[in-house]
Image (cartoon, grey):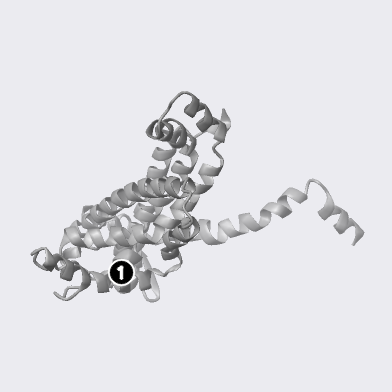
């Protein structure tokens, strides 16, 4: 007993004890599922049987429906990332340097949608952008003699709804990230700029943005990853069956093929393609921002 206590208290064993929970979690929740997905992507799986079919499941690379899902996902990711970086930066600067007494209520108001579930948000948006002439947005359009829109029936307006829902939900979260970054910018930099006669745009471009670069990289990474994995924003509008696949995303394609149709092999192949897309985009971003391999230098 005494030897076992000495063994666990030794300096050689301690690092393994502390890292064991992370290693176990990594193996159980990432490594094992990834290996299983790779194996299933080369199989045709039916109840009670899994048959090896080689690269047959990867025929989705030439499937027009999968192309549509990839196209929708890329367009959604581009616009959502663009807005979810620029808008929170501007809002964080506005709120952080505002002297109004409504500063705290404004922060709470912007962050509030983040605690609302996507399903509830989807119900709200479906009421606002309903198909009926009496819906909120169509009523506003009618006041300007604009005909009512079938918001969820057209590709352009359908994409607009998904982007708006994502922006509505996550602007507050990203704003908090940028506000935390603003707290780390020394006031001396702005004071020196004031002495040199710099105006607000110059201070924003030459002090604020460069100082926020690590936060910007982080927000871009998580926003791109979330955009490529987008599913809920589409599902709450069309429940997995949008007209002409205008709301189909890669994750929606995986859900439809793997869960709804029971084609786990095809769904696994699509999942691996999505994983590779996320890894490639993440590496490109880190390389572009000069952070890849920075710790080794």
Q: Residue at x 45, y 42 (%)?
A: 217
Query: x%, y% of residue 84?
Result: 37, 51
Residue 204 in sight from this viewpoint: yes
Residue 157 point in image, percent of width and height: 19, 61
Question: Is 98 located above or below residue 153 in the figure?
Answer: above
Residue at far top of view:
196
Does residue 187 appear left or right of residue 60 in this picture?
A: right
Q: Nearer the viewer, residue 48 or 19?
A: 19
Q: Is residue 101 left or right of residue 281?
A: right
Q: Is residue 113 left or right of residue 145?
A: right
Q: Residues within 10 Å of mark 1 (few under 14, many from 20)?
A: many
Name the outermost residue toward the right.
2
Closer to the camera in the image, 197 or 29: 197
Can you say which quadrant of the picture contains the N terminus?
bottom right
Foreground pick, 281 / 56: 281
Q: Nearer the viewer, residue 213 or 244?
A: 213
Question: Is residue 206 shown above or below 88?
Answer: above
- Residue 144, located in which quarter of the rendered image? bottom left
Q: Residue at x 46, y 56 (%)?
A: 173
Visible residue check, residue 43: no
Q: Residue at x 28, y 61 (%)?
A: 162
Q: Which residue is mark 1?
A: 235
Q: Quadrant of the C terminus?
A: top right
């Amino acid at each position: 007993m005494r030897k076992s206590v000495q063994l666990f208290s030794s300096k050689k064993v301690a690092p393994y004890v502390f890292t064991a929970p992370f290693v176990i979690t990594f193996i159980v929740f990432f490594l094992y599922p990834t290996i299983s997905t790779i194996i299933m992507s080369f199989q045709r799986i039916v109840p009670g049987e899994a048959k090896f079919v080689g690269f047959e499941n990867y025929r989705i690379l030439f499937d027009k429906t999968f192309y549509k899902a990839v196209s929708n996902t890329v367009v959604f990711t581009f616009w959502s990332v663009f807005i979810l970086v620029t808008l929170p930066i501007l809002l964080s600067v506005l709120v952080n340097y505002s002297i109004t007494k409504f500063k705290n209520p404004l922060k709470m108001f912007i962050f509030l949608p983040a605690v609302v579930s996507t399903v509830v948000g989807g119900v709200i948006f479906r009421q606002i952008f309903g198909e009926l002439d009496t819906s909120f947005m169509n009523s506003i359009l009618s006041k300007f003699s604009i005909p009512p829109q079938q918001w969820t029936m057209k590709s352009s307006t359908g994409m607009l709804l998904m982007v708006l829902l994502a922006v509505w939900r996550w602007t507050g979260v990203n704003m908090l990230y940028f506000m935390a970054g603003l707290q780390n910018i020394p006031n001396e930099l702005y004071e020196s700029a004031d002495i040199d006669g710099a105006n607000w745009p110059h201070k924003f471009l030459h002090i604020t943005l460069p100082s926020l670069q690590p936060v910007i990289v982080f927000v871009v990474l998580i926003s791109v990853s979330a955009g490529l994995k987008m599913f809920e924003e589409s599902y709450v509008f069309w429940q997995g069956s949008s007209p002409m696949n205008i709301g189909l995303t890669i994750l929606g394609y995986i859900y439809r093929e793997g869960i709804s149709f029971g084609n786990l092999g095809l769904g696994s192949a699509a999942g691996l393609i999505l994983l590779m897309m996320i890894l490639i985009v993440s590496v490109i971003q880190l390389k572009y921002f000069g952070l890849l391999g920075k710790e080794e230098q």
